[in-house]
Image (cartoon, coloured by chain):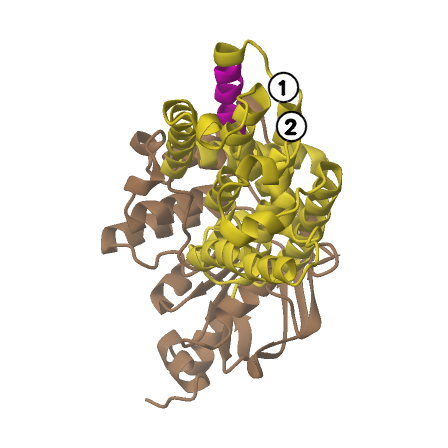
């Protein structure tokens, strides 16, 4: 299988603080990789670097063989993202927001209209398509964020804590949507929730203090450490 | 899809965003009030008589098209948060990970801010033109030059606001920094240079005075009776030179803002 994401010796300093330390990772086509680690481990930094929102201090990243730093626009053209707790322009409706983002990605006309209806339905916002986002709750914005990530039916999904701020029902629904949407997609998924990661992803990368501690199949990790929780605690420098 | 196509999309949606905001209608209301007040006070207080000047369409135009503050306020209202808010309110997490260059986004935002400001200014000039026709049956040709300088002033201030917006963390900070720089910093330098006997033709606020210099009436003539010692020292700026000075500020500040926005990280 083709290596769709290649991260090679990636480091990132924030004003002298080393947030990511020589990280190397390869993700193959249709693999679903969970990035796990404690707060400040470097998960979000890795994803932001991959989306071209940060510049690396050293190292390189490739998406579909395209260098993210040198050709950011081309590299991320097949990527759908949901980063941090996303915010939207409050004066727009979801239909307008998705129309804007879809057009920026080259979609137009009936194809765009059809796709907007599809993703709005998928995330359960059918009744809210024409309501201004200023009236939305955090959970509704999370749903809209997922809708925009899926809008152009991207080959790769980069999701950072996608269910953060959702109620338990919302989290279950969200997980189901991602499971449904992930077919024929490569997913890089950062989370604190080990059970969620285990349900969605077949591979796991554990990061701590900016370093990659483990990267392999979920099943191998469970076999080696008996459980994901045990592995997580062991690899992030905490003993049971 | 070409970057030009993307620019059209960004401009269209940024413009929609501007027109949906209350501040657009606020700026419009303030402008309408200012123009109507200027017309009413000029006529109601018989300003030409009090200043011992002959009333003329040109003198009337000088008073009612003193739009530099409208251009500045409009520009700052629309541009102060253009870039900073993407980082401050985290909307950049949705906008930036799209296959569109940051340059395109900044230019699109700039065009939308300019169109919004130009709309407000155009309405103000249109009312002034109607008033001129109503009172004098003619519109001085200088009004077009005045509008051109007001629009270029708006461009310069939008560029300055973009520059602060691309550097500072908050939208409010960018707005205040733009206003303070224009109204305090430039003003102090200008006044000091005038008192010292230098012509501050190269300063933004001085060039902005050319908004009323296109009617063939000098500032000494129009405002000679007020302002004390400063009034005598005010030199009417040359409209063409001032237009070019404003253009240089607009281009330099704008290019700097693009350069800084491209390098800014979404931390």
- Give me the chain that's yellow: B
Determine whether, in the image, residue B2 is placed left or right of residue B113.
Answer: right
Q: Position of residue B263 (x, y in %)?
A: 65, 62
Chain A shade in the render:
brown
- Name the residue located 43 percent from the left edge and 60 percent from the top edge: A84
- Mark 1 = which residue? B140
- Mark 2 = which residue? B215
Whether residue B131 is in magenta: the answer is yes
Q: Which quarter of the figure has residue B115?
A: top right
- Name the residue located 35 percent from the left edge and 29 percent from the top edge: A130
In front here: A183 or B214? B214
Q: Position of residue B109 (x, y in %)?
A: 57, 42
User: In the rendered image, is residue A82 in sight?
Assistant: no
Q: Residues within 10 Å of mark 2 (few under 14, many from 20)?
A: many
Determine whether, in the image, residue A184 is placed left or right of residue B252.
Answer: left
Note whether A94 is above or below A141 in the view shown: above
User: In the rendered image, is residue B176 in sight?
Assistant: yes
Give the letter of the chain under mark 1: B
Q: Position of residue B39 (x, y in %)?
A: 43, 24
Q: Secondary structure at mark 1?
A: loop
Q: Position of residue B133 (x, y in %)?
A: 53, 12
Label 1 close to label 2 by CB (< 8 Å): yes
Q: Upstream in the sequence, badge 1 or badge 2? A: 1
In front here: B47 or B114? B47
- Name the residue located 70 percent from the left edge and 61 percent from the top edge: A69
Residues in magenta?
B121-132
Q: Which residue in the rendered view is the most extreme toward the left? A: A168
Cα distance between the residues tagged 1 and 2: 7 Å
Give the letter of the chain under mark 2: B
Determine whether, in the image, residue A39 is placed left or right of residue A104.
Answer: left
In front here: A62 or A105? A105
Note whether B63 is above or below B97 in the view shown: above
């Amino acid at each position: 299988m083709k290596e769709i994401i290649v991260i090679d010796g990636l480091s990132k300093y924030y004003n002298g603080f080393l947030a990511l330390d020589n990280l190397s990772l390869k993700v193959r086509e249709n693999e679903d990789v969970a990035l796990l680690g404690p707060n400040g481990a470097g998960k979000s930094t890795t994803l932001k670097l991959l989306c071209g929102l940060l510049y690396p201090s050293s190292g390189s990243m490739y998406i579909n063989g395209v260098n993210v730093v040198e050709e950011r626009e081309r590299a991320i053209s097949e990527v759908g993202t949901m980063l941090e707790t996303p915010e939207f322009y409050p004066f727009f409706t979801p239909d307008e927001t998705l129309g804007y983002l879809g057009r920026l990605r080259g979609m137009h006309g009936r194809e765009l209209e059809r796709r907007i209806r599809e993703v709005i339905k998928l995330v359960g916002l059918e009744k809210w398509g024409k309501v201004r986002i200023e009236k939305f709750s955090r959970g509704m914005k999370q749903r809209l964020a997922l809708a925009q990530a899926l809008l152009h039916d991207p080959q790769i999904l980069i999701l950072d804590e996608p269910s953060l701020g959702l109620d338990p029902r919302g989290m279950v629904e969200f997980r189901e949507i991602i499971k449904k949407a992930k077919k024929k997609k490569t997913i890089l998924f950062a989370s604190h929730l080990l059970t969620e990661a285990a349900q969605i992803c077949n591979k796991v990368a554990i990061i701590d203090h900016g370093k990659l501690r483990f990267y392999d199949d979920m099943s191998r990790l469970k076999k080696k450490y008996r459980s994901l929780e045990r592995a997580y605690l062991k690899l992030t420098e905490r003993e049971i | 899809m070409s970057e030009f196509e993307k620019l059209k999309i960004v401009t269209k949606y940024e413009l929609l965003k501007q027109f949906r905001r209350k501040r657009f209608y606020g700026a419009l209301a303030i402008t309408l009030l200012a123009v109507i007040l200027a017309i009413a006070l000029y006529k109601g207080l018989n300003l030409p008589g009090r200043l011992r000047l002959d009333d003329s369409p040109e003198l009337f135009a000088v008073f009612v098209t003193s739009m530099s503050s409208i251009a500045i306020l409009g520009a700052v209202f629309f541009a102060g948060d253009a870039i900073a808010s993407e980082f401050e309110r985290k909307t950049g997490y949705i906008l930036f990970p799209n296959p569109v260059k940051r340059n395109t986004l900044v230019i699109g935002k700039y065009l939308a801010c300019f169109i919004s400001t130009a709309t407000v200014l155009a309405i103000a000039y249109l009312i002034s033109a109607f008033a001129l026709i109503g009172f004098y049956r003619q519109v001085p040709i200088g009004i077009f030059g005045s509008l051109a300088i007001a629009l270029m002033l708006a461009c310069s201030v939008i560029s300055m606001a973009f520059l602060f917006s691309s550097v500072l963390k908050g939208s409010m900070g960018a707005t205040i920094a733009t206003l303070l720089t224009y109204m305090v910093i430039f003003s102090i330098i200008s006044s000091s240079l005038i008192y010292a006997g230098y012509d501050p033709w190269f300063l933004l606020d001085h060039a902005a005075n050319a908004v009323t210099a296109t009617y063939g009436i000098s500032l000494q003539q129009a405002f000679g009776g007020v302002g004390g010692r400063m009034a005598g020292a005010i030199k009417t700026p040359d409209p063409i030179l001032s237009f070019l000075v404003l253009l240089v500020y607009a281009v330099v500040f704008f290019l700097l803002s693009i350069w800084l926005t491209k390098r800014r990280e979404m931390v």
